[in-house]
Structures are given as structure tokens and as C-alpha cells.
Image (tube, helix red, strand yellow):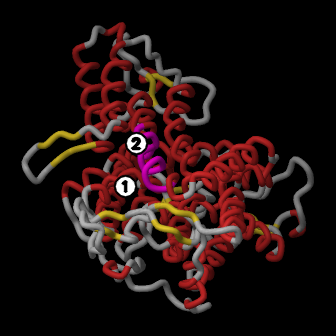
Amino acid sequence: MSFGWKVVHGGKTPPAGESVAPDERLSWGRTAGLGAQHVVAMFGATFVFPILMGLNPQLAIMLSGLATIFFLLVVQGKVPSYLGTSASFVGGAAAIYAQGGDPADVTGAVLVAGVVLALVGIAIHVSGTGLLHRLLPPVVTGAVVMLIGFNLAPVVSSVYWPQDQWVALLTMTAVILMAVGLRGFLGRIAIFLGLVLGYLLSWVFDRFGQVTSVLPGQNLRGPDGQPCDAEGPYCIATAFPHDRVSWTRVKEADWFGFPPVSDFANGVVGFHAPTFDLAFVLLMLPAVIALVAENTGHVKAVAEMTERDLDPVMGRAIAADGAATALASAVGGSPTTTYAENIGVMAATRVYSTAAYYVAALVAIGFGLSPKFGELVSATPGGVLGGITVVLYGMIGLLGAKIWKENQVDFAKPVNLVPISAGIIIAIGNTSLAITEDFVLSGIALGTIVALVAYHLARAVAPADMRDGAVLVVGGAGAQHDDDIPGHRDEH
């Protein structure tokens, strides 16, 4: 059950070496403090990623709280976790905007991906994980995670970094130093601390003068140098002097109220109905593979910490994340995923109580009811985002390599090396394949299809001694092979 927690340790801080189980809690005062820690842990990424996807951060924060409550109810309180904004969809969103889409197209594609993820979770719950591991072995899963991250490199180099290269450089340096130099909880929120520092640096630099750079969608000029209305091939944003930090909309916003209703023509993004386009949907579907791997890893990590067998609720957890993503995007919100940041907080405190997550969810909902907070977040300078994303996107990509390493994927075997390398280069280079005049596969979508289909095709024709039988292991010391799965025998 999700409610009815048992009070342990007299409600006080547990003695050294002791822990608090998911169905237990401390005093409500201490539980509130732990919930606040979880809010801080998820806060940075949960509002940074909506900005990168062109969505409303205030709405994302509010919906993350609702999604977390929904998740905890679906898993019956057995998997303590927070559902924050997913980074896996950022690449797909960037690709959609590059092809002329708008936020409604992004949320429509995300909604379909969420439904697919929910169906995958249901299938896992019914049939077990064996088939999934054979369809998506770690060599493919790692490749998809990697290409999602590295495909975003042009967004850093062409959109964020040029807006203020020196603030971007200083922010990037600060994030690197804090991530390595700070210990414990502070080191885990280095991205958030870097954003705050970069924000402050931008404000200080504005005291000494404006920056001259290009702001997407602003100062639009045609070939004749005259102002024009809509950004496009013949009407582009040009450099002009401007403040790094502009709080005009922050001052105008109310302290309390719901996020705004979208008005795309005037640059307002908030609540809106999604729209659907097959080409855009295909750009988002690769994120499903990444989220299956991510959620699997997180549930296994929680199982290890709580010393409980959570395999029976693995499918529930994945389905709950998919359903939460679909529900959030149905009203214009951001996709969700279980958060490693909050798992890190549990590892540090040894308090696994779901009561703390309910508190964190309610606090997030409260933040989401402040338009002024939402505008403050939306005013984050582009240079700051440049410094953060250059680290963040690279980290997303390298998580793919981490999956390969933990599963001991052998790239000496051509069946692993050849098809996967092709898929990654297609995605990073944003290579396209025109199926018809109106339907084009490119970047992440095309790279994922090549990596998945070409791998299984290569494996089908490869000699038995060339086949890699590893299945997904996240956080483990060694690889698991197909012959470790009951009822399956590998050919080598």
C-alpha cells in the first residue's frame, strides 16, 4: 500500500547503519525535510530540460509532482522514486523544431512515445523481461542512448553557446569543477549550482554592458535588412545588443496562479493540446528504448538499496512512467522519467520512505502554481544554458558507453562493431533518408532504426562464434548472458 507508513526509530534520525523502508517513515517534520532534499535534487534538471525542449518549466514542475504521485500509486509504494523531466526527448524535440515543428508537435510526439512506453511496461509485466532483453541487447541500448546525447551537439554550438561564449565557458568550467570537487549531495546537484552561478554571472556582466549576439526568434531581418515577421530561410534572426538577463516578464507575472495557456504567435508556451505528425513521432520513438534502459537501471538500483526483489513490479514502473508521460504531454507538459538524482539522495540518507516523495511532489505542485517562478526560470540566459548543455549532452551520450562497459560488450566482434557504428554516425551527422517527398527519416530516428535492424540482421547471418549474448545489466559488475535466462540457450 502507498499509505499507512509505520513510524520507526521513534520518528528520529536512524542510527548509523540503519535504514527506513519504503513503507516506513520518520516524524513528519523530518519527513518534510527529506522531501525538501528531494525537491532540490530534482529541481535543476526538471526545469532545465523543458526549456531545452521549448516547453513551459512552471508547468513541468507542477506536472512532475502529479506524475510522481501517480507513479507511487501504480507501483503500490514499492518503488520509491521521483518522476522528473526526461532528458531522452531533448534530441527529438530539437529535431522537430529543426524541421519546422512547434511545441504542440513536440508534445504530440511525446504523447505517442509515452503510450508506447506504457505498452512496453504492460508487456514486461505480463511476459517477463527475457524477450525484451533479446530484442534490445545492451549493444543496441547503449548505442541509442549515446546517439541521443551526441546528436544534440549542434544545438550547443549553434544555438546556446554563441549567445554568450564567455558566460558559457565559465558556467561549463564551474559545473565540471563542482561535479568533481564537491562531495556528497552538493556534488550531485552540480548542474543546478552551475545554473545558479551562471545566472548570477550574467547579471553581474550586464552591469558592465550588453552582449551582442543572436537570439533565436528575435530581431528578424530579411535579405534587404528590413524587419520581417516569421523566422525562416529568408527571414533570419540577426545579432543585436541586448541584456543577458531580462526580468520584464518576471516583474509582470503574478505570484500565484496556473501556468499560462499557450499563444505560440506571441512566444507564450504553457497549457496546450498536442498535434500529431507521423514524421515527428518517429523522431521521438527512439527515446522509448532509452527510457526502458533508464527505468530498468533505476528500479534495479532501488532494489539493491532496499534489499527487496522488485522484478515483479518492473513492468508496473515502466508502464507508470509511460502513462505519466502521456498524461503530462496531453496538456502541454514535459515527458517524465525516474530520477537518478533522487536515488542518490536515498543512497546518501538510507531513507527510502515513499512519504518523503509525497511531500516532494506536493512541494513541486506548489512551485508550479507560481507564474513568477515560471518566468524567472524561463529568463535563464542562453549563455548559461550553453555552458550546462555542453556537459549535460555529453554526459547523456556517455551513459551509452557506460551501458556497454557494465555489460562487457565486445567490439572485437564485427556483429557489434559494424552495424552499431553505422547507426551512431548517421544520428550524429543528422543524415537523412527521403522515403517520399513529404516523409523523411533523419538523425536520431534513422540512426536508431539502423542500429536496431542492422544489428539483428547482422546477428542473423553471423557465425555462432561471432554472436554476443549479453543482456542488459545496469549497475552490475558483470554481464548477464542469454543462457542465464530461464528457458533460453545461446548458440555458442
Q: Relative to the observer, which residue lies in front, 55 or 195?
A: 195
Question: Quadrant of residue 227 in the image?
Answer: bottom left
383 part of magenta stretch: no
* Residue 131 seen in the current view: no
Instruction: Name the residue type under label 1.
Output: Ala
Q: Secondary structure at mark 1?
A: helix
| Quadrant showing the N terminus | bottom right
Position in image of residue 262 (x %, y %) = 37, 81
What's the mark number on residue 94?
1
Q: Main secondary structure of the magenta part?
A: helix
Q: Give x and y (percent) for residue 224.
A: 25, 66
Q: Residue at x 37, y 20 (%)?
A: 416
User: Residue drawn 56% across and 48% down?
Assistant: 392
Judge whether residue 156 is colored magenta.
yes
Disc number for residue 42 = none
How many marks do you count on the picture? Answer: 2
Question: Is 347 left, or right, of 392 in this rendering?
Answer: right
Mark 2, residue position: 151
Magenta region, residue range: 147-160
Above or below, comparing residue 1 to residue 343 in the picture: below
Mark pair 2, 1: CA separation: 9 Å
Q: Is residue 113 above or below residue 475?
A: below
Residue at 60% over, 53% down: 168
Dot 2 or dot 1, earlier in sequence: 1
